[in-house]
Image (cartoon, helix red, strand yellow):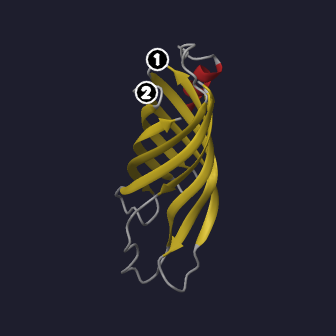
């Protein structure tokens, strides 16, 4: 999927924004979704996930952003587990986003990110940690107007083997 998005972006995409629309500029985004992975914290189920992003669009095909994502909201993780374990709590990173416009309102995009994932310990005598990891993602965006957009996105955090599916809003100014 990411290869298809990259190929479309490099070829210039199917459509470009009109001359009256300035596509460069800053944006803010927020999204809600679910995270699921192989960590014991997920235990075969999905956990709620929330993310925020701030970025800059250089042109219709390229953006760079800083983002953060909570990977679960379970405050009682490992409470009754006598052995204890560490689990992914949240992630902070930077990403490049390559978009391929499908029409004036729709675009397909891919993301490549790097960042740090906080690994929280369930027992007091265990040490919290953080690990560097890469993230890959793909999504479909719909622009209501030049300022507001809706995005359905899938991200994968590679080192911790976490999959996140989210729906979000983006405000461009």
Is label 1 in a helix, a strand or a loop? Answer: loop
Q: Measuring 48% from the left and 25% from the top, which residue is drawn there?
A: 107
Local crowd size for mark 2, using a 10 Å CA cut-off: few (<14), some (14–19), many (≥20)? some
Kindly indicate the quadrant of the structure image that contains residue 41: bottom left
Is label 2 in a helix, a strand or a loop? Answer: strand
State which tag comes first along the sequence, 1 or 2. 1
Label 1 and label 2: CA atoms lie apart by 8 Å
Q: Nearer the viewer, residue 24 or 166?
A: 24
Q: Disc 2 designates what residue?
A: 143
Percent coordinates x, y for residue 28 in the rendering: 51, 42
Q: Nearer the viewer, residue 45 or 96?
A: 96
Kindly indicate the quadrant of the structure image that contains residue 132: bottom right
Q: Is residue 159 visible?
A: no
Q: Nearer the viewer, residue 25 or 16?
A: 25
Q: Are marks 1 and 2 in contact (CB under 8 Å)?
A: yes
User: What label does residue 104 carry, if any?
Assistant: 1
Percent coordinates x, y for residue 78 in the rendering: 40, 75
Instruction: Indicate left or right for 71 with 116 as reference.
Output: left
Asked if 170 appears above or below 6 in the picture, the reply is below
Q: Measuring 54% from the left and 86% from the top, which residue is drawn there?
A: 125
């Amino acid at each position: 999927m990411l290869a298809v998005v990259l190929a479309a972006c490099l070829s210039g995409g199917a459509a470009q924004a009109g001359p009256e629309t300035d596509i460069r500029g800053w944006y803010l985004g927020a999204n809600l979704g679910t995270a699921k992975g192989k960590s014991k914290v997920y235990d075969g189920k999905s956990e709620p996930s929330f993310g925020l992003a701030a970025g800059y669009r250089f042109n219709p095909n390229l953006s760079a952003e800083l983002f953060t994502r909570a990977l679960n909201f379970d405050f009682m993780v490992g409470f009754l587990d006598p052995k204890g374990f560490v689990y992914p709590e949240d992630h902070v990173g930077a990403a490049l986003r390559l978009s391929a416009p499908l029409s004036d309102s729709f675009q397909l995009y891919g993301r490549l990110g790097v960042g740090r994932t906080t690994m929280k310990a369930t027992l007091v005598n265990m040490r919290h940690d953080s690990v560097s990891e890469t993230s890959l993602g793909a999504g479909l965006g719909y622009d209501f107007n030049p300022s507001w957009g809706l995005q359905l996105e899938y991200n994968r955090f590679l080192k911790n083997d976490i999959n996140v599916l989210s729906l979000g809003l983006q405000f461009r100014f």
